[in-house]
Amino acid sequence: MEQDDESARRCDNHAPVSPRTAPILPLRPGLPERQTHDYKRHGTTTLFAAFNILNGKVIGSCLPRHRGREFVRFLTELERAVPPDLEIHLIVDNYGTHKSAAVARWLKPKKRQRFHLHFTPTSSSWVNQVERWFGLLTERMIRRGTFRSVEELERAIYHWLATWNEQPKPFIWRATADVILDKVRRCKELAGTPH
């Protein structure tokens, strides 16, 4: 039986609300797009997101903090959004939020046995496909954006999310395990690390 696998993790980039001190200068012949390095920070938000690896759809929620109670709010949203006959596999990092007492209490009832948390080893977040989606969000929207308030940032994130879900794309690994392991070996050799 095929199950609906979901990946969930926080966007603990805590996406900064950061208007640049000057507008982005556009791309021109012979000149790249440019922006100032400085900004004024107006606050942060935390984005919890679940990436469906089968179809690429994302369920996301911006919350003011990154604690167990906010993660429980997100889990409740997932519970409502995912049909009750599907299993939900959450790939999460070892951050304390995901292991908090509030989360353990929420997961305890029998009706929530369809939730399965899988913890990635340290420095293995690249295995989690939602991380790639966070990377796209950061590269294409957050870094290039100018946000004068948390609300403006969150509106932009929700707009990005809605646009993504209009034509979602699952990520497909193209490299074989041998290619990946060979790259790891070469990097270790370059770094002079024998193990």
Image: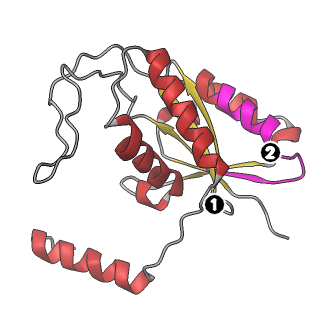
**Vertical position of residue 191 compared to residue 167: above or below:** below
In the image, what residue occupies the spot 42% across and 49% down? Answer: 136
The x, y position of residue 99, in whole percent, is 57, 36
Q: Neighbour class for label 1 at 10 Å: few (<14), some, many (≥20)? A: some
The x, y position of residue 148, in whole percent, is 36, 15
Tag 1's secondary structure?
A: loop
- The reply to whether the magenta stretch includes residue 83 is yes
In the image, what residue occupies the spot 16% across and 39% down? Answer: 34
In the image, what residue occupies the spot 51% across and 24% down? Answer: 154
The x, y position of residue 122, in whole percent, is 39, 52
The residue where tag 2 is placed is 82
Q: Is residue 5 left or right of residue 27?
A: right
**Vertical position of residue 153 compared to residue 178: above or below:** above
Separation of residues labelled 2 and 1 (CA atoms) = 14 Å
* Part of the protein shown in magenta: 72-90
Query: Can residue 99 be seen?
Result: yes
Q: Between 117 and 34, which is closer to the camera in this rendering? A: 34
Q: Is residue 125 left or right of residue 61?
A: left
Q: Is residue 76 left or right of residue 50?
A: right
The residue where tag 1 is placed is 53
- The reply to whether the magenta stretch includes residue 89 is yes
